[in-house]
Amino acid sequence: MSPLLSPDSPELDDAHFALLAHYAKHLGRAPKATRFASNTGERRSRQKGHGMEMLELRAYQASDDLRHIDWRVTARTGQTHTRLYAQENDHHQLMLLDLSSSAYFGTRHTFISTRFTQLAGIIAWRSKQQGDTLSYRLAYGDETHASNKSGTLSNLLSKLKSASQLQHRNSESNHASIWSNTLLTSKTHNKDVIILTDKQTWDKSEESALMQLAKHNRVYWIQIFDSNTYNLPAGHYQMADHLGLKQITISKHSMQQVKKDFFDQNAQLRQKLASFGIQHQLFDITESPEKIARYLLSQGAIH
């Protein structure tokens, strides 16, 4: 079975994160850029604009903006040349990873927490390979980490490796939602924001912050769950959470009710996010992180 779909351990090591670089590199090409309009009428072109620093001078291509033609070089060489600016190759992203203690669980292939950290690793590698700017904030267990600096890939991968450690299911975090009460998120504008979380609720103050984030950015909400959890046969099970091991008795009726509650709550979540202009996508743990990354690529969230 694929080492990406079913890694040897839910706790990922350096070798696995190195493997993710290969998958990130071969995701394919991003679709043609689209335009983004906020609720206030502000418009951001996802087609790169004219930056202040020229990156290179190259032969004209059919898709180039005519305003960027260097007429002096064109006249001197007899061949049309275009100025390519640094901003034209710069795609700004913010990745927010928020794992509850319940994410450190799985019935097949791996744990939900592992799938999230794999996906985050692919996003990190892809951003580095494409020369994009990636800021991030991570929350798991009782830890939070953030950076808005470029060139911190090794630090980010180290934090993601830590996030996959099962010890974090023993801590029930009390921090606010990943997007709330931080300078990193409150000052975020004109970015593609990718929220990776298994959580489905927030309070009123957190909702206001989420609305502000969606007002000035294109936001993608990626949720991963384990559908097989709702197909367990009736019986007695030993489960582990932040309180330790405990015995759980499952009946057919209780399982059906838990499944209904989850999907009812998820439908409400999707409707609420849609009202903010946030794209929500629910993936099963049986789907590989590469497939989820390709979805983000198809939506323009990563390049």
Image (cartoon, helix red, strand yellow):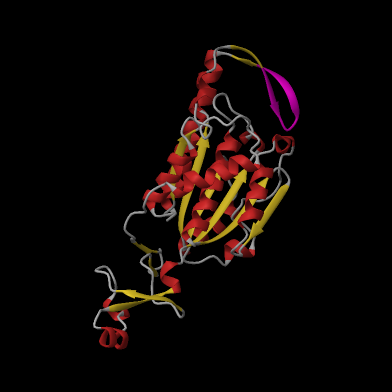
Q: How many marks?
A: 0
Segment tinted magenta in the rendering:
238-248
Between residue 178 and residue 148, name the one nearer to us. 148
Quadrant of the image containing the C terminus: bottom left
On the image, the x and y values in percent for residue 99 come to 62, 42
Q: Is residue 240 above or below residue 44?
A: above
On the image, the x and y values in percent for residue 239 come to 68, 22
Q: Residue 48 in magenta?
A: no
Q: Residue at x 63, y 32 (%)?
A: 10
Q: Residue at x 29, y 71 (%)?
A: 64
What type of secondary structure mainly makes up the magenta span?
strand
Q: Is residue 173 visible?
A: yes
On the image, the x and y values in percent for residue 50 come to 39, 77
Between residue 106 and residue 74, name the one nearer to us. 74
Which residue sits furthest front? 77
Q: Is residue 199 above or below residue 38?
A: above
Q: Is residue 201 visible?
A: no
Give the quarter of the image for residue 48.
bottom left
On the image, the x and y values in percent for residue 190 come to 46, 66
